[in-house]
Amino acid sequence: MLEASFMATAVLYAAASLAYYVLLSRGLGASERYVHGLLGAAVLCHVAFVALERQARGASPFVDIHGTLTVLSLGTSIAFLLATLRYRIAVVGAFVTPITLAFLLGAGVSHHTAPLTPGFAIALLPVHVGVTVLGLVAFALAFGASLGYVLQERKLRRKELTGIFRRLPPLDVLDTVSSRALVIGFPLFTAGVILGALFVARGASPDGISPAQMVGLVTWLVFASVLFLRVLAGWQGRRAAIGTMLGFACSVVVLTMYALGGGAS
Amino acid sequence: MNEIAVVGLSHRTAPVELRERLSTATSDLAAEVVALRDAGLEEALVLSTCNRVEIYAAGRSAHDVVKRVRAHLEQRAEGSLAEATYEHVGEEAVRHAFRVAASLDSLVVGEPQILGQVKQAFDAATGAEGARTLLSRCFTRAFAVAKRVRSETGIAEGTVSVSSIAVELARSIFGELSGRRVLLLGAGEMGEAAAKSLADRHVVLRVVNRSTEKALALAARCGGEARDYELLASELVKADVVISSTSTPGFVLTEELMRDVVRARRHRPLFLIDIAVPRDVDPRVGALEGVFLYDVDDLQSVAEANLRSRRAEAEAAERIVAVEVAEFEQWRRSLELAPTIVALRERHLAVVRAELEKTVSKLHVEPADRAALERMGEAIVGKLLHPALHALKSAEEDRDALVAAARRLYELDRPREDPSPAGAEGHPRGATAPVPTLDRGERR
């Protein structure tokens, strides 16, 4: 049952990714809501999978990389659906849904990694992972909007006003989504980083800072710089979008290191 | 058998002076339809736009319809129109109506206004009882065809006028334009047109010109406010969209000036439209961060590319039209067939009822048995007529000939006496009811 719900979720995410891709590349007219419906079905299936797994394991999903990636994937889908309701950025789904699928598949291959270390601050771990995941969800959305921005900006600059140019949302909308997601995600991610640093300081990780945690710090620095330059130096548009994409790429590296087992220290 | 015909003149066939002379104001469309009906046309619809004047009409003979419509138009034009008009009858008239409504026959293929104009013409014709069976169905389908063409092909994608491209580009950068700041620099005609298109979107419009009087006059025409030329740099920093169309020979917006402006704007996106010839904006400005520079050639090449892509989409649209025309023709022919089928059935049922009445009046038949006998009679008629009706319904090429043969053989067009049962309609019980010719033949 557990496996079946995982498979069904993955298939539905794959189908939704394909549908969003068609929406972006060819346009589907009034069929946009059916594509959202497909992603909605994937989300419901995903919720069922998370519930079944929690029941089977009897623990919060936030205790290892498998659970983290599972919830990160679910959260990204939900955040995108909410954002598209507010900002009408349906085609951005073509960038976001493959990420949710990748997170889910990552969870699928990282079942047995990162077991709880004895003596670990068990009560705080789910909080650390939880807020970090929420921050990453916002960053994934910011990444999707930023990628849309960079593509749309390039089309406008090259004066190629056909194809996806007509279907991508306006630059201003994409910049707003990216900026707001960053503003929401950064404090959460920062809280996650601080809690992570506390674990390291209190010796919860006996070997000190791991390579994954180092890259995590770099991620934080990149996002902090983008936010700083946005707020104080008035950075907008392409530079901010590229910075956001770079920050998200760093966070993907961290997650990959954890998933491959190199993150646990 | 009614047929549709259209006689008209358009931008392809007639000069604007003639089109103007024959055009009808929207408020007069219904009166025009009434005049056409008075001229002996069963149905009529008048479509009058700046690019075309067309009269669609329906009647028993297409030839007669065309003759009457042409006479009406020539009376209005006070002269012969032979060279300037075109005419289509039957299936081709329906195809023309569908193509016009779907904007396939427009000067700018895919432009959206024509559909609204056709709807106005249809409403006026319906109000004046000019669009009944054939024209009503034809134009209702034309609207559906136009909708299909717009949603299933890319014929309406991409605007094709410089002003609307400017608006479309501004929207692709800023989304909602309401409240955005637009700076109009110079007093060129195209600049004014583009500024007016943007002003329709409730932007905040500022006008800067070397001549204050011109700036004031332009601001008044476009619904904006004039600013002194000295304030140009600060207005550039505040603006979201700049439309430049001065007559200055050199660059007005130099790279040096714009570099400072971009810095002061903190790289906030700026959409620069340079409509001036010679250009107002140094082309190197387009490479600055956050600046999207389009000159008149860029806008025109976008217009041409959009037009080319619309024309390519028109092929798909023509296929939709062809399918819909075929469906309409099928419906029209079924309309002609239906009265023949009804008449055939009625003729046979009348015979059965008359014979039944004669027979049962001599016997003691219970009402339930009588009902059963009536049902039997109807079933016999159904079975006897089945091969003939099937042949009529499935006929393609020779349907008209078969319908005509059936009507002649059974004398369906000949006025006949009431063949209803005699007893029920006042004939003395037992008397022979008047029956159609066929009955007598059958009795023999």
Image (spheres, rainbow, N blue to C red):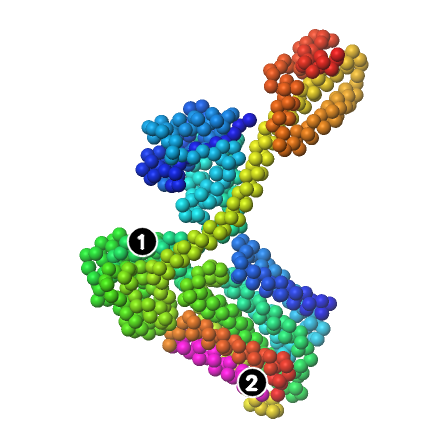
Q: Which percent across, then down, holds residue A172?
A: 42, 65
The kind of residue on which mark 1 rests is Ala
Examine the rendered structure and indicate whether residue A203 appears above or below residue A16.
below
Magenta-colored span: A210-232
Residue shown at the point (28%, 64%) measured from the top left: B280
- Residue type at the position of mark 2: Gln
| Inter-mark Cα distance, 1 to 2 | 58 Å
The residue identified by callout 1 is: B193
Residue A205 painted magenta: no
Residue A39 appearing in the image: no
Could you tell me which residue is drawn at 39 percent across and 41 percent down? B12
Tell me residue B226's x, y (percent).
24, 59
Q: Residue B117's image quarter?
A: top left
State the mark number for residue B23. Answer: none
Q: Quadrant of the N terminus of chain A?
A: bottom right
Q: Position of residue B353 (x, y in %)?
A: 71, 18
In terms of secondary structure, where does tag 2 sit? helix
Q: Magenta-highlighted stretch: main secondary structure? A: helix
Looking at the rendering, which quadrant does residue A7 occupy? bottom right
